[in-house]
Amino acid sequence: MYFGSSYLLILVLFIVASFASMGVRSTFNKFHKVRNMRGLTGAQAADLILRNNGLYDVKIEKVSGYLTDHYDPRSKTVRLSEPVYDNPSIASVSVACHEVGHALQHANGYAPLSLRTAILPAAQLGSQALWPLFIAGMIFSMPQLINIGILFFSFSVVFQLLTLPVEFDASSRAIKLMESYGILSTEENGDARRVLRAAAMTYVAAAAMAIGQLVRLLLLNRGRD
């Protein structure tokens, strides 16, 4: 019963996550073809906001890949993928401003971002150590190892949950910044909201997957008793 329900839960969440991923790619590709009225590239929009907010110590770098954009608080660097960095589209500017939103969070001491950054090493360790500990615990009949593995993985779940307010807040900041600096027109801002909303759904799906995986582990462990 536990095994069947846990696998079904993960399957459903995997399907939801897949649709969310396809949705963000489809929305990004759609508005990546639409040039913004000011003709600003993602890098230019990011630079404009950083300078106007006095964040002269934050760097902007181009990185390879597709939708690999992120902000690194350790090096104070906004990293933009090639399709975002050089392209003057609505989608590119939206994504770039979202990442700058993280830089502003960092500068303002936004608590959820600080906490998420602090638990990142534990979250990474939890993801890596989970299955070796879980399998070893089952093979050697050592429930302590299984419990430790589940405890470690819990940090990954907390990390995913903290990601939600961090990402939602960054998107909210991005919309306000694009409006206040006239980076996009009122109509274009509506399209930007669609891009960022689609991206947000991937984080919701990832958090749901993490919670589902934790529930599955607890059910599997309970089924051993």
Image: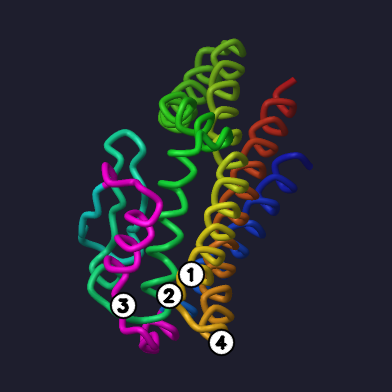
Q: Nearer the viewer, mark 2 or mark 4?
A: 2
State the residue position of label 1: 178
Magenta residues span 29-58
Query: Are the residues at dot 2 and dot 1 in contact (C-beta closer than 8 Å)?
Result: yes
State the residue position of label 4: 187
Q: Report the colour scheme.
A: rainbow
Q: Nearer the viewer, residue 149 or 109?
A: 109
Label 1, label 4: how far apart the Cα atoms are = 12 Å
Residue 117 shown left or right of residue 10 in the figure: left
Q: Residue at x 59, y 21 (%)?
A: 151
Label 1, label 3: how far apart the Cα atoms are = 11 Å
Q: Element type at marker 4?
A: helix
Query: Are the residues at dot 2 and dot 3 in contact (C-beta closer than 8 Å)?
Result: yes
* Mark number displayed over residue 40: 3
Residue 129 shown left or right of residue 208 in the figure: left
Asked whether 119 falls inside the magenta stretch, the response is no
The N terminus sits in image quarter: top right
- Work out whether mark 3 precedes mark 4 in sequence or the reverse, and give the earlier one: 3
Q: Where in the figure is residue 12, as x and y percent of width and height?
A: 66, 59
Q: Where in the figure is residue 178, as x and y percent of width and height?
A: 48, 69
| Residue type highlighted by circle 3 | Leu
Q: Say if 221 sits above or below 206 in the image.
A: above
State the residue position of label 2: 183
Q: Residue at x 60, y 54 (%)?
A: 168
- Work out whether mark 2 precedes mark 3 in sequence or the reverse, and give the earlier one: 3
